[in-house]
Structure formats: C-alpha cells, structure tokens
Image: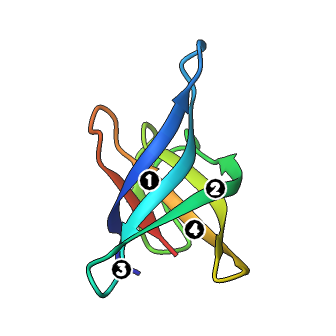
Amino acid sequence: MKPVNIDAICLHSRDGKTAPLRIRVVDEDGLYQAYTIKECRDVSHQGARIMPDGVYVCDNTLIFECTINVFGRDKLVRLYNEPPSQEWRMTH
C-alpha cells in the first residue's frame, strides 16, 4: 500500500509529544476531504521495522494508528512523519 501525502493539524505538548487532531486528504477528484481523528495510538519508537502496510520505518519515525469517520463508518489509518521533516503521510 503506497502512502499518500496529507495535511495534519497536531497538538504539541510541553513535554515534546505530538498528537494529530485533524487530517486533510486530496481525493481522486482533486478535492480536499477533512477528517477529525476520533482515536489515536502512538506506536513510535519501537525500532526499525516494516509496518503491516509495508512501510519501512526507523526508530525516530512518528507513527500513529488513528480512527477516522468516513461516510458514517470508522476507518483505521496510519500516519507517518519523519522528523525533522514536516511532511505527513497516510496509509489506509
């Protein structure tokens, strides 16, 4: 599964942790679709590995397993960010 680039709005806490709150994705028609993250689990910093969706990650990659609502159905997505890059990617 190929990751797609997304826009992300995140919360940055005092202790340096990041938590995504909303994402925006360009659909197949070229229109932006925005989603609020309902649930989010940080699965970062578990060493270099290949994720279940085929994405290779390093220990410093930020990885979040999130639930969003798409057309009335909950959907699990994974969000990836490679610091210091500000680029976010998503697989679903």
Residue at the front extreme? Answer: 31
C-alpha span from label 1 to label 3: 19 Å
The tag earlier along the polypeptide, 1 or 3, is 3
How many C-alpha atoms fall within 10 Å of the one at disc 4: few (<14), some, or many (≥20)?
A: some
How many C-alpha atoms fall within 10 Å of the one at disc 1: few (<14), some, or many (≥20)?
A: many
Judge left or right: residue 82 versus residue 43. left
Three-letter code, disc 2 = Ile
Q: Position of residue 58 (x, y in %)?
A: 41, 46
The tag earlier along the polypeptide, 2 or 1, is 2
Residue at the bottom extreme? Answer: 29
Q: Which residue is mark 2?
A: 37
The tag earlier along the polypeptide, 4 or 2, is 2
Q: Using the image as rendered, state which of residue 92 and residue 60 is in the foreground.
A: 92
The structure residue drawn at horizontal position 41% and vertical position 81%, both measured from the top left corner, is: 1
Q: Which residue is mark 1?
A: 80
The structure residue drawn at horizontal position 64% and vertical position 55%, both measured from the top left corner, is: 37
Q: Which residue is mark 4?
A: 77
Q: Are marks 2 and 3 in contact (CB under 8 Å)?
A: no
Q: Position of residue 65 (x, y in %)?
A: 63, 58
